[in-house]
């Protein structure tokens, strides 16, 4: 939605209207990310239990209502509350949309996810300029009101299309409330600690990491003992599922860390304005818009492994070209690096998400989307914290003035420029190493598409319920139901299955 990317440009006006300080501004941004990251897993589990289309509609409607509350917020406190509600609804919206794509398109979901990524990229590209126009000529409140008609259109389309996807809807089942609370508390505490680490230092947020470790540890023990877990731990015994999520963590760590510090370096050391910096980053966004769906389609045909291995290498090459960036290297360093970076990212976005969804059983599509979104979000936050530590250490080693800080705007001290440049180079090298580590991890991915491919036997599934076809009791077929998935298998005359279920899923 537009408000997610446009809120950055509105913060100065919000600060002036409410008379708030920097800390309150941070919470207006942090509250959304905190709720979103904390609830991805819970949202995915709700999708699988209560219905993906239903939860997508609930999430979209909730996002519109929370946006309306943000638009009429009389104070910063109410605005922060609205942002928390936006994040909670956004988790349902994101996991619901991805799981719907998986259940609708099955093993050919790469191209659909590529189109989805193209759409989100277009919103990310158009959000800041649109938000700037609304702030300048209307009010920052319209940034939030803009989400309401978009949500109405999305709900209408989902409602009209329900006949085509109704058979993919899972049945209702019990939610592991204790597990949901533990994982939300654990990931929320971890997210808070990662975000505040750079601002307050590790010692001030150590309690958050301790709380996260304790909550997640109890969660894992609980999930291994409960009969209806929120997160079936045997999912991670699936080699490809585990590998693709580790690769997601590493690759999105590289993406977030590299772009965050590139933007700071271009404005503080090279001297570009925010508008100029945004224009210089357009080629990478354009590459995603033009190529993501194409690579998604190729991933469906040839399998995602090639793209998950090659894409991060291309990205890392672009990051290393940024080591040449200064005020004289626009053509030979910055722009070629941005183009390579964008092409590499376009190779990844659809295949990596599609792989994360298709390596899990179909009835866990929502949970798989939540797991993958959580890994990408935590990887991004951790990268900014770790690369920030690298930047601080290198900068302090290269400067002798304790009053200087890296990437400070408006300062032309030779020490600042030298220290910030060295720190930026170190951050880009670490980011490139993270991307290459993601590529190396993806080498172990083995799943390839095959003609007439059948779904794997689900080792975490409950025993199937078998019944005879009521239309023909003596017919040598029966209907085997695996929650939301139905397949027809041969049976004996007595009605017992003659062999384990096999054959293509029918969404």
Image (cartoon, grey):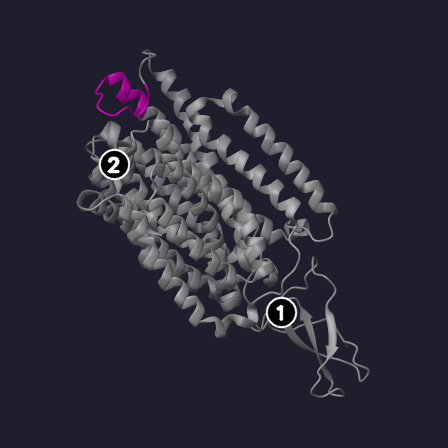
Q: Earlier in the sequence, mark 2 or mark 1?
A: 2
Name the one closer to the observer, 321 or 185: 185
Name the one closer to the observer, 403 or 153: 153
Q: Residue at x 36, y 20 (%)?
A: 395
Find residue 6 and report its image quarter. Answer: top left
Mark 2 or 1: the one toward you: 2
Q: Is residue 98 left or right of residue 315?
A: right
Label placed on residue 13: 2
Find residue 219 and report its image quarter. Answer: top right
Q: Secondary structure at mark 1?
A: strand
Q: Secondary structure at mark 2?
A: helix
Q: Residue furthest front?
A: 74
- Estimate the x, y position of residue 376 in percent, counting from the top left: 48, 45
| Residue 244 on the magenta segment | no
Above-or-below relation of 496 to 357: below
Find residue 292 and report its image quarter. Answer: bottom left
Above-or-below relation of 298 to 229: below
| Residue 416 on the magenta segment | yes
* Residue at mark 1: 485
Instruction: Give the CA separation, mark 2 to mark 1.
Output: 51 Å
Magenta range: 405-420
- Estimate the x, y position of residue 301 in percent, counting from the top left: 47, 66
């Amino acid at each position: 939605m537009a408000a997610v990317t446009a809120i950055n440009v509105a913060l100065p006006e919000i600060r002036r209207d409410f008379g708030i300080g920097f800390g309150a501004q941070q919470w207006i941004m942090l509250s959304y990310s905190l709720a979103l990251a904390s609830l991805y897993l819970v949202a995915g589990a709700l999708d699988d239990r209560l219905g993906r289309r239903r939860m997508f509609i609930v999430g979209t409607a909730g996002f519109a209502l929370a946006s309306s509350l943000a638009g009429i917020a009389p104070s910063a406190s109410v605005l922060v509350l609205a942002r928390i509600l936006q994040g909670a609804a956004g988790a349902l919206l994101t996991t619901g949309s991805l799981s719907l794509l998986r259940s609708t398109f099955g093993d050919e979901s790469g191209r659909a996810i590529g189109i989805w990524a193209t759409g989100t990229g277009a919103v990310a590209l158009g959000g800041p300029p649109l938000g700037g126009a609304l702030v300048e000529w209307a009010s920052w409140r319209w940034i939030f009101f803009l989400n309401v008609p978009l949500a109405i259109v999305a709900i209408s389309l989902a409602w009209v299309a329900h006949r085509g996807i109704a058979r993919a809807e899972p049945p209702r089942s019990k939610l592991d409330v204790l597990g949901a609370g533990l994982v939300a508390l654990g990931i929320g505490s971890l997210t808070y600690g990662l975000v505040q680490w750079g601002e307050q230092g590790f010692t001030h947020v150590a309690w958050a990491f301790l709380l996260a470790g304790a909550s997640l540890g109890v969660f894992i023990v609980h999930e291994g003992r409960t009969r209806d877990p929120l997160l079936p731990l045997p999912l991670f015994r699936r080699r490809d599922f585990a590998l693709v999520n580790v690769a997601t963590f590493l690759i999105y760590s590289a993406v977030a860390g590299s772009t965050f510090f590139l933007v700071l370096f271009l404005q503080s050391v090279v001297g570009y304005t925010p508008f100029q910096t945004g224009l210089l980053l357009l080629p990478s966004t354009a590459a995603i818009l033009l190529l993501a769906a194409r690579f998604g389609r190729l991933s469906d045909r040839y399998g995602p492994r090639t793209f998950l291995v090659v894409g991060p290498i291309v990205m890392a090459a672009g990051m290393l070209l940024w080591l040449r960036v200064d005020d004289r290297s626009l053509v030979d360093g910055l722009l070629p690096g941005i183009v390579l970076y964008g092409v590499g990212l376009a190779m990844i976005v659809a295949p990596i998400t599609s792989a994360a969804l298709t390596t899990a059983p179909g009835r866990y599509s929502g949970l798989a989307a939540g797991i993958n979104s959580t890994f990408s979000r935590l990887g991004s936050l951790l990268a900014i914290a770790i690369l920030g530590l690298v930047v601080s250490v290198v900068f302090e080693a290269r400067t002798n003035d304790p009053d200087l800080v890296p990437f400070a705007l408006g300062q032309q001290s030779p020490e600042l420029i030298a220290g910030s440049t060295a720190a930026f180079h170190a951050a880009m090298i670490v980011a490139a190493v993270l991307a290459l580590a993601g590529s190396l991890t993806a080498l172990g991915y083995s799943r390839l598409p095959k003609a007439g491919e059948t779904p794997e036997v689900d080792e975490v599934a409950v025993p199937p319920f078998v019944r005879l076809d009521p239309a023909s009791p003596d017919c040598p077929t029966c209907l085997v139901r695996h929650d939301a998935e139905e397949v027809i298998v041969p049976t004996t005359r007595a009605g017992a299955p003659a062999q384990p279920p096999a054959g293509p899923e029918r969404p």
